[in-house]
Image (tube, helix red, strand yellow):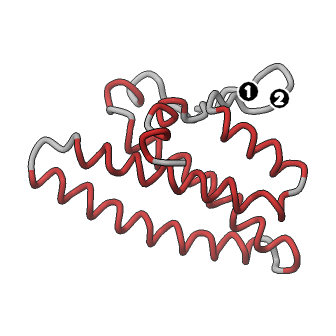
Amino acid sequence: MNRRALFPLLFTVPALAHGADGAPDIPDVEEARLVKLARQAPKLHLPALRDYLRQKLDTAYEIALASAVDAEHRKAIESAQKHWLEFYEAQRGVAAYNAHGGSYAVPAAMEEGIFHLRQRIFCLITPFLQGWVGHHPFPR
């Protein structure tokens, strides 16, 4: 999928709200399809979901850079993204250890990585006053 096609989907980052069936409410049709497949066969489909979210992350990052108010703001976004990617990779390693190795280590690392990708996409594309104050995405 090209980046232009991903742009509108960025504004459908799944909320932490859940539907009546307990499944997360994911308005992005492709992401919802990949989530369904990953639930059915995690080892087979988690990589595709992760790759799709990495594409969305790249697009969200481009949007954030384009919306920078000046060079200093842009440099701060670039630095934050560089450090976030380091955290992302390190935390995936921790998730594999937390799964106590074995056959679940790789899917656990991917699942935690997917969680962090979604959160980072939200952070990059959601203006502070619109998405954080009074509308905190996490339960209190």
Q: Position of residue 47 (x, y in %)?
A: 70, 62
Circle 2 Cα neighbour tier, 10 Å, few/some/many (<14 / 14–19 / ≥20): few
Circle 1 Cα neighbour tier, 10 Å, few/some/many (<14 / 14–19 / ≥20): few
Q: Is residue 5 above or below residue 21?
A: below
The kind of residue on which mark 1 rests is His
**For residue 49, side relative to residue 52 (left or right):** right
Q: Position of residue 121 (x, y in %)?
A: 47, 45
Identify the residue position indicated by label 2 in the image.
Answer: 22
* Nearer the observer, 47 or 20: 47
The kind of residue on which mark 2 rests is Gly
Identify the residue position indicated by label 1 in the image.
Answer: 18
Q: Is residue 140 above or below residue 63?
A: above
Q: Is residue 128 above or below residue 19?
A: below
Which mark is on residue 27?
none
Q: Position of residue 85 (x, y in %)?
A: 44, 67
* Nearer the observer, 96 or 2: 2
The residue positioned 83% from the left and 62% from the top of the image is 44
